[in-house]
């Protein structure tokens, strides 16, 4: 099975209204689908541009940004579901912070299937900014999604830097680890990129990074955004020698496309020069996490 993936290098714009946001998202999804993509990955916190459509006291304040953007999740998800069905694509919607009934906020990515079904993955490992300034809490469940575009897990940004999360996804059947990211420096971008490449090596699978890019100096949450989309695999049989399948242009708004041969994952795990995936359990005392499998 070959799946064309589109990883967004997504600019945070000063979105003036819901209609402006809906038009932007429709254009982005339409462009990717028109280029044959069946799996579309949007970045971490990309939905925060919607805060700008409210009053200055909202988009100037971290906590009010959570309240107002999180409250729009139903409307945002419905738009994604409509576009996924219309274009017959699977979409990883840009993550957003959302409060539970108890008032605790979580960073939530949603997986939207072409059938209109929606699953979610909460970020599991929180950065210092999320812990100390934004007070966004960690999720608990690790999920793997079975979709028409393949079986994958979603490791949100910092999650990609912790191997046991991706390992649980791989053991539950994931052949792709999708990594929505939002980083404000080259250091942060490269930490996530190195994490993606390491996870692809360890699990002998694909890793796909989708970042926010550009400046949105009006926002205290996503003011500076640095990165490039990337698609990575294990540097072994059937994959590039350096493991880099595709790379975007640094900090430029664009879609990055790559055709992922999911059969190549099975082949490298079966016939590669090394068996990182198979040999994982041989590490002395290695702990194991479990992932839930959700069919969409």
Image (cartoon, helix red, strand yellow):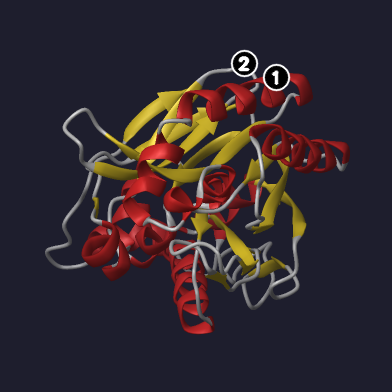
Q: Indicate which disc, 1 or 2, sits on the residue closer to the N terminus.
A: 1
Q: Is residue 6 above or below residue 229?
A: above
Where residue 208 appears, as percent x and y from the top left, is: 58, 56
Give the image location of residue 98, x and y in percent: 35, 38
- State the residue in front, 65 or 57: 57
Q: Quadrant of residue 29?
A: top right
Quadrant in the picture for residue 92: top right
Badge 1 vs badge 2, beta-carbon distance below 8 Å: yes
Q: Which residue is mark 2?
A: 115
Which numbered dot is residue 4?
A: none
Label 1 neighbour load within 10 Å: few <14, some 14-19, many 20+: some
Residue farthest to the bottom, as pictured: 187
Residue under circle 1? 85
Foreground pick, 243 / 229: 229
Q: Is residue 173 visible?
A: no
Mark 2 closeness class: few <14, some 14–19, many ≥20 residues within 10 Å: some
Q: In this image, 258 relative to 74: left or right?
A: right
What residue is at 12 percent from the left and 64 percent from the top? 285
Location of the N terminus by quadrant is top right
Q: Is residue 128 left or right of residue 180?
A: left
Q: Residue at x 78, y 26 (%)?
A: 87
Counting the numbered discs, the total is 2
Residue 257, horizontal then vertical, whole percent: 77, 54
Which residue extends farthest left? 285
- Compared with residue 263, is residue 235 higher up or lower down, i.e. above or below? below
Q: CA distance from mark 1 to mark 2?
A: 6 Å
């Amino acid at each position: 099975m070959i799946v064309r993936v589109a990883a967004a290098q997504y600019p945070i714009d000063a979105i003036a209204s819901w209609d402006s946001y809906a038009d932007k998202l429709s254009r982005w999804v339409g462009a990717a689908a028109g280029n044959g993509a069946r799996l579309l990955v949007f970045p971490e916190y990309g939905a925060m541009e919607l805060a700008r459509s409210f009053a200055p006291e909202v988009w100037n304040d971290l906590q009010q940004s959570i309240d107002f953007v999180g409250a729009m999740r139903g409307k945002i998800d419905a738009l994604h579901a409509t576009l996924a069905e219309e274009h017959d694509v699977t979409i990883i919607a840009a993550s957003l912070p959302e409060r539970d009934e108890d008032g605790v906020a979580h960073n939530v990515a949603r997986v939207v299937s072409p059938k209109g079904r929606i699953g979610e993955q909460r970020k599991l490992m929180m950065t210092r900014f999320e812990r100390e300034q934004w007070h966004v809490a960690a999720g608990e469940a690790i999920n793997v999604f079975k979709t028409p575009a393949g079986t994958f897990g979603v490791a949100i940004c910092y999650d990609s830097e912790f191997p046991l999360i991706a390992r649980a996804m791989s053991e539950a059947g994931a052949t792709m680890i999708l990594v929505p990211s939002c980083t404000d420096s080259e250091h942060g971008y490269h930490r996530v990129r190195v994490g993606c490449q390491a996870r692809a090596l360890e699990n002998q699978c694909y890793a796909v990074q989708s970042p926010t890019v550009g400046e949105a100096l009006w926002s205290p949450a996503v003011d500076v955004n640095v990165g490039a989309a990337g698609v990575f695999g294990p540097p072994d049989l059937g994959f590039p020698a350096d493991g880099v399948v595709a790379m975007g242009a640094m900090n430029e708004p664009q879609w990055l496309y790559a055709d992922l041969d999911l059969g190549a994952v099975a082949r490298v795990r079966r016939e590669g020069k090394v068996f990182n995936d198979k040999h994982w359990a041989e590490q002395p005392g290695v702990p194991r996490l479990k992932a839930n499998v959700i069919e969409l």
